[in-house]
Image (spheres, rainbow, N blue to C red):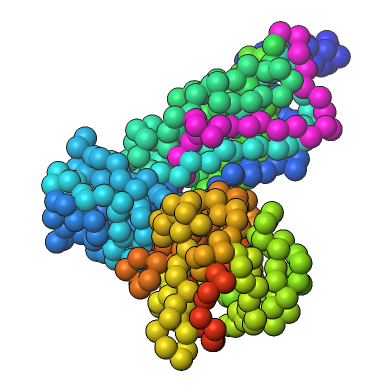
């Protein structure tokens, strides 16, 4: 009798156990993925500040609200080139930051409109980031899903998908499923925000859900590192703004990586963290510079053709220096007497440089007022503003002129042409120029030419040439 009763009790216990398993199945437990991290293409806070008091339509200097109405309370974390959306509600216009003036002001590229200048309006500069989630699966599930949960804001009045930076998490911004890259050929989707409760004591937070669903019969590999890329340069989540606290202190947000089975049951979950902080402004000043030199480098060899064909240097070349061009005794009867100097110029001015030249007066005999006239290119019609060919000398007319050979290939003169120097600064002519910052020191040879007639009065003649280098900053 006792043995029959024992058998019945054992059978009853077995049936109750089976029934319990059917009603309350055991939770599937798996090993979470390892080496989980989220690498952001930019960890810089978005900017969410306000228009301060005293801004008027047309102003190019924007005053920042430094009170406590907005999370961004200085101009820090704004940079030249940033695009700002400024205004109230839906009446925002876009402006570009030209310069950051002080911690409370920025300079805009254009005057602000009266609509945007309203005190208390918002000043927004969104910063988006591509999230690269890397991990190594330790378990797998056929036709399963991998989800990345990125922290979203749940604090009113912030909205997690309105394109405006939130303090409590990342905004969906322009992210679409097409901007998500999945491993194993999985299909990407961007879901709605979901709540997750974790910790002890438990807390609830909200997350954006980005999912990679494996195809039918596909199993993710175990032990091999993979990545999920969330976002592109044009479609990405918007980084949070600061929370108005101490600048330089990062805000840290949790993200989750989940593996689900084909029935969307959570198999495993790993947590990671993302830090977002202000970018560091590094400033330096480069002082304006302009360097101009005159020397005789390359122009002290008798017989060389420093300025091209027909510009053979005379015997006085060996005596040429930075500030002396000494022809010495001239060949007469229409022969060319030629000497040269090198001009060099460089600058860091954005508008480049211009070098001009003029003479103080015609070459004059030191004993009286006799001159060697400025050239007409032996009747060729050259003027102070127009260079022409001067191929032969005259036995009856004395002349003095010059030509320029730009050694970087952008000659002011057509090759072999000459003209006279203008007398006085009002007629100064450009002999070297650059309309942008030169990549290195630019050089040119200036060649002086003198011819004298058979009847030119004997004596020592002299003139002076004034070169002026000007940079455009």
Place of residue 8 in the rendered image (x, y in percent of width and height, measured from the top left): 78, 11
Which image quadrant is residue 332 in? bottom right
Whether residue 273 is visible: yes
Report whether 231 appears left or right of 301: left
**Horizontal and vertical percent position of residue 46:** 42, 49
**Relative to the observer, which residue lies in front, 255 or 82?**
82
The part of the chain drawn in magenta is: 216-243
Whether residue 285 is visible here, answered yes or no, is: no
Query: In this image, 253 relative to 99: left or right?
Result: right
Residue shown at the point (50%, 24%) measured from the top left: 176
Residue displayed at 35% across by 65% down:
427
Answer above or below: position of 211 versus 404.
above
Q: Nearer the viewer, residue 163 or 293?
A: 293
Give how far across and how far down residue 360 sits, in percent. Answer: 40, 78
**Relative side of 141 to 271, left or right:** right
Residue lying farthest bottom?
A: 367
Majority secondary structure of magenta residues: loop
- What residue is at 44 percent from the left and 29 percent from the top? 174
Of the pair 171 and 396, the residue shown nearer to us: 396
As for residue 236 lying within the magenta part, the answer is yes
Figure check: 235 above or below 217: below
Quarter of the image that includes the N terminus = top right
């Amino acid at each position: 009798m006792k043995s029959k009763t024992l058998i019945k009790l054992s059978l009853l216990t077995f049936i109750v156990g089976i029934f319990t398993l059917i009603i309350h199945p055991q939770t599937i437990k798996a090993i979470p993925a390892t080496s989980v991290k989220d690498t952001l293409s930019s960890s810089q806070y978005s900017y969410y500040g306000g228009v301060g008091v005293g801004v008027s339509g047309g102003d190019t200097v924007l005053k920042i609200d430094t009170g406590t109405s907005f999370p961004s309370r200085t101009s820090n974390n704004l940079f030249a080139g940033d695009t700002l959306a400024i205004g109230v509600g839906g009446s925002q216009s876009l402006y570009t930051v030209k310069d950051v003036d002080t911690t409370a002001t920025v300079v805009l590229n254009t005057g602000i409109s009266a609509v945007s200048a309203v005190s208390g309006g918002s000043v927004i500069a969104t910063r988006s980031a591509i999230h690269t989630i890397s991990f190594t699966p330790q378990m797998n599930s056929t036709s399963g899903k991998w989800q990345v949960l990125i922290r979203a804001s749940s604090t009113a009045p912030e909205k997690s998908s309105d394109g405006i930076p939130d303090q409590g998490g990342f905004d969906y911004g322009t992210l679409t499923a097409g901007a998500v890259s999945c491993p194993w050929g999985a299909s990407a989707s961007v879901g709605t925000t979901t709540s997750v409760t974790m910790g002890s004591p438990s807390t609830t937070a909200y997350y954006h859900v980005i999912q990679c669903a494996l195809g039918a019969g596909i199993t993710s590999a175990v032990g091999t590192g993979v990545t999920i890329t969330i976002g592109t340069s044009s479609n990405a989540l918007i980084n949070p703004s600061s929370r108005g606290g101490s600048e330089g202190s990062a805000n840290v947000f949790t993200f989750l990586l989940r593996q689900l089975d084909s029935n969307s049951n959570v198999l495993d979950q790993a947590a990671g963290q993302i830090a977002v902080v202000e970018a560091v402004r590094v400033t330096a000043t480069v002082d304006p510079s302009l360097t101009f030199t005159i020397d005789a480098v390359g122009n002290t060899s008798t017989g060389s053709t420093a300025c091209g064909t027909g510009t053979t240097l005379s015997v006085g070349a060996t005596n040429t220096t930075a500030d002396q061009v000494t022809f010495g005794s001239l060949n007469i009867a229409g022969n060319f007497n030629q000497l040269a100097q090198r001009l060099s110029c460089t600058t860091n001015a954005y508008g480049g440089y211009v070098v001009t030249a003029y003479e103080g007066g015609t070459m004059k005999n030191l004993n009286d007022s006799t001159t060697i006239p400025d050239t007409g290119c032996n009747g060729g019609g050259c003027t102070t503003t127009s260079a022409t060919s001067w191929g032969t000398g005259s036995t009856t007319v004395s002349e003095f002129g010059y030509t320029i050979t730009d050694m970087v290939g952008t000659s002011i003169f057509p090759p072999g042409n000459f003209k006279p120097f203008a007398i006085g600064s009002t007629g100064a002519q450009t002999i070297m120029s650059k309309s942008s910052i030169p990549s290195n020191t630019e050089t040119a040879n200036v060649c002086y030419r003198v011819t004298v007639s058979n009847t030119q009065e004997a004596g020592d003649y002299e003139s002076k040439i004034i070169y002026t280098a000007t940079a455009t900053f």
